[in-house]
Amino acid sequence: MALRRLLLVFAALAATAAPAAAFYLPGLAPVNFCEAGKEKPECKSGIELFVNRLDSVESVLPYEYTAFDFCQAEGKKRPSENLGQVLFGERIEPSPYRFTFNKKETCKSVCTKTYDTTKPEDKQKLDFLKKSMLLNYQHHWIVDNMPVTWCYDVEDGQRFCNPGFPIGCYITEDGRPKDACVINSEFHEKDTFYIFNHVDIKIFYHVVENEALGARLVAAKLEPKSYKHTHPDNPDCSGLPMDISNKASGEVKIAYTYSVSFHEEKAIRWASRWDYILESMPHTHIQWFSIMNSLVIVLFLSGMVAMIMLRTLHKDIARYNQMDSTEDAQEEFGWKLVHGDIFRPPRKGMLLSVFLGSGTQILIMTFVTLSFGGEKWKTNVLLTSFLCPGIVFADFFIMNLILWGEGSSAAIPFGTLVAILALWFCISVPLTFIGAYFGFKKNAIEHPVRTNQIPRQIPEQSFYTKPLPGIIMGGILPFGCIFIQLFFILNSIWSHQMYYMFGFLFLVFIILVITCSEATILLCYFHLCAEDYHWQWRSFLTSGFTAVYFLIYAIHYFFSKLQITGTASTILYFGYTMIMVLIFFLFTGTIGFFACFWFVTKIYSVVKVD
């Protein structure tokens, strides 16, 4: 759902930025509508409404529309989803709601559902409906490839347009209205559910300049309502709301109805029809100053680090290269002393090489295997192909088992799971071996200095040059430049909000790469000056520790921002979070390693070594 939503938003923004003769992406071309009796090959009168999965901010478990006992479409073909939609748990279904362009309908009956609470099957269906209202599950309807939104007033006179609307709401035992129950003063019975069994739909259209082509839909809005419908066969959409007592017994009837009207909107064009949703999103206006302020600070600090490093290194290199006599050489100090050990293979070099291979694939979508003079290149390639992807797949498979057990629509079908394994074993693994084959045919990297036979003794280190303090401090600055964007991204994933600041995200990505590189180089220089030449793992972990701060922030976000309840939802949240943390750890760690590798290669290639 999130992936599809972001792609559609991106397409809408791209179209908005285009000139009057806007371009349209494949699959998102405008559809023209005209009134009944005036249909043409390029203009149709029927408008289909599709329903997607239902989700909640209080639960990670989405459910498909057919899991609920709502009105179903009879004999209609279900649209096929692509692999991305299936992985994100989208289940788009045809609905029994069908409209004719520019034809008004008032209180039209869709179906009536009857539950006999003395029958276990009916009671189970009704209980599932109550549980969904208690957790504030939301419908997601689609008309002409755009969401049907529910717009309502929020604080400070703002109007928020939600691309979903609730099934219903609940009044607690102490009379406190939960969630959407605050919109109607008639919702007041204690320990009672109120189901939104009626929707008033308004469809807005823009007449094409060439009227022969008809009109294009630019917005679809609805208002959920609740009516008891004392005469379901002839509803009038008036009277008391449809209440379901939590202790209800006997027979319960729920009649579903809708009204639809059409309105011409001359100010909105098809290419900018998403704007009203994006402009109403919360947190999009108030955060810009703080975001820019953070970027300025990060850029300033990066500039300062670069300036200090360049000036200090320039003096060091000039001093070292002026030492011509043997006595001067004996008085060497600092990072030049470890030139004979700087390229010594690290401990657990195989594991580091595997992490770097996976991190490089994530970073630039290609394969590079760095072997520290080892001979077990076959083992290296096998581990690169299977270790990190295997960990992610195992986590993903466990999460999928939980989703299967809960009957969630986010559970990946068996056929799709086989397709994912085929992509891994038939594309990713062979490409890794092909990359390794060509990589190992190349000449080995030549280091600018030779490695001594006997390792140099590392002197006693101060607290600040010991590994752990440096690693912990190294991740602070990179995390500082991403945590605000991280808030928006987590909102998009877990709170079902749209994310559309892709240009700014790219800028933050560039800043992250620069900051990881400079922070790692700075700490690497300090350790070399302290005659500690074990830089390989330290450089990887220094910038990779940013992922630990990511994990801490995700835990804080879970407890302070989300309303997720239930053991299964909690396990799923942290299970998926661990996948993201692992990928981010490999990504940032690889940046730090290669930045430090470039740095040590550069500085030791410009000093004179006897």
Image (spheres, rainbow, N blue to C red):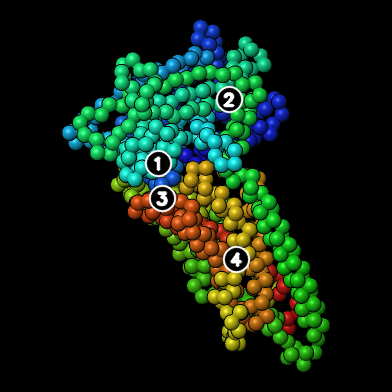
Q: Check disc 2 and report the residue beneath it.
A: 218
Q: SS at mark 4?
A: helix
Q: Quadrant of the C terminus?
A: bottom right
- The mark that comes first in sequence, 4 or 1, is 1
What percent of the width, then of the height, locates residue 165?
Answer: 45, 34
Tell me the residue at 56%/26% (across/down).
219
Q: Are marks 3 and 1 in contact (CB under 8 Å)?
A: no
Q: Nearer the viewer, mark 3 or mark 1?
A: 1
Q: Determine the CA span between mark 4 and mark 2.
A: 45 Å
Choose between 132 and 489: the one closer to the eye: 132
Residue 476: image tag: 4
Amino acid tagged 1 = Pro
What percent of the width, then of the height, locates residue 360?
Answer: 57, 58
- The mark that comes first in sequence, 2 or 1, is 1
Would you identify the image quadrant in which residue 454 lies? bottom right
- The mark that comes first in sequence, 2 or 3, is 2
Choose between 292 and 609: the one closer to the eye: 292
Q: Determine the CA span between mark 4 and mark 1.
A: 43 Å
Query: Vertical placement of 267 versus 576: above or below?
Result: above
What percent of the width, then of the height, locates residue 208?
Answer: 64, 17
Query: Vertical placement of 90 versus 581: above or below?
Result: above
Q: SS at mark 1?
A: loop
Tell me the residue at 56%/63% (across/down).
546
- The mark that comes first in sequence, 3 or 1, is 1
Total numbered labels placed on residues in the image:
4
- The mark that comes first in sequence, 4 or 3, is 4
